[in-house]
Amino acid sequence: MEDIANCTLEDLVRENQITLTQTQKNYLKIKRILDFIISCAALILLSPVFLAIAVCIKCTSPKETVIFKQKRIGQFGQPFWIYKFRSMKHGTPELGTSEFKNAEKYITTVGKFIRKTSLDELPQLFCCITGTMSISGPRPLLAREDEIHFLRNYYGVYQVKPGITGLAQINGRDQMGIYDKVRWDRTYVRNISLFLDIKILWKTALKVLKSEGFADNYSEDIHKS
């Protein structure tokens, strides 16, 4: 008890940090190359889908911008811009996921479909090319989500880049509480490997096709720029 009482917060955080093995550190370098190659290929193959979504957004909501951008927290706690196809009206209240009660009145005509199918996430492939995101990893958070930021720092989750999809997304997605999300984030960092990433991508595809784990009480934070 005396040892614990004499510990500082920094000591406790340091003791609970996940230490990546040399093999995992080497894999992260390979993963960066794979992210770049896969994202470039996906952007080329999916360019007709990008065009179709952009046209649909403009035709149904001519006053709205096609792309929504927002500041999120990335690797090592550094902020970066994340990009999505806009699915909610400009001027939507700046509320977090759990705070939003009547999202339906703010979702655009096309928005509900692209959100349910996760097509709104496709522009994040550009983030994978620039290196601020990875295809798989913990989902990036808003800066104001203090509690989950603390937990992620506590366990060393920010050693890896945030992902378009991750373990939390295939194990509950929007329907999961923050402690469960951090548990899955921590599990991902502890076990990061090529096999795990392939498993996540495969299960993500199945989840999207079945529309599992999606909740409609989600809101984008609108940043005027």
Image (spheres, rainbow, N blue to C red):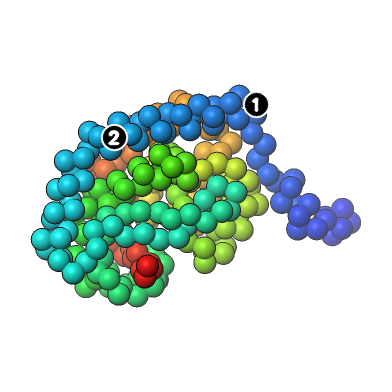
Q: Residue at x 14, y 48 (%)?
A: 52
- If the image is split into quadrants, where does the C terminus sit? bottom left
Apparent side of residue 70 relative to residue 66 in the rendered image (left or right): right
136 vs 220, left or right, is right
Tell me where residue 23 appears, x and y as whole percent. 61, 24
Would you name the residue on which mark 1 appears?
Answer: 22
Q: What x and y, as percent, mark residue 197?
A: 44, 32
Residue at 30% x, 75% y is 91
Q: Which residue is drawn at the image coordinates 33% and 39% (left, top)?
A: 204
Residue at 42% across / 29% down in the picture?
34
Position of 192 with respect to 59 (left or right) is right
Give the residue type at disc 1: Gln
Outermost residue toward the left in this view? 59
Residue 159 sits in quarter = top right
Of tags 2 and 1, the one toward the viewer is: 2
Q: Residues within 10 Å of mark 1 (few under 14, many from 20)?
A: few
200 vs 106, nearest the viewer: 106
Residue picked out by circle 2:
42
Q: Amino acid at mark 2?
A: Ala
Q: Nearer the viewer, residue 51 or 156?
A: 51
Q: Is residue 178 left or right of residue 216?
A: right
Q: Choose the circle earlier in sequence order: 2 or 1.
A: 1
Q: How far separated are the C-alphas under marks 2 and 1?
A: 30 Å
Residue 45: x and y in percent read 22, 33
Badge 2 marks a residue whose secondary structure is helix
The single residue placed furthest to the right in the displayed view is: 2
Where residue 169 appears, x then y in whole percent? 39, 46
Q: Secondary structure at mark 1?
A: helix
Task: Count neighbours of disc 2 (C-alpha within 10 A) and say few if under 14, some if 14 to 19, many if 20 or more.
Answer: few
User: What is the count of numbered marks?
Assistant: 2
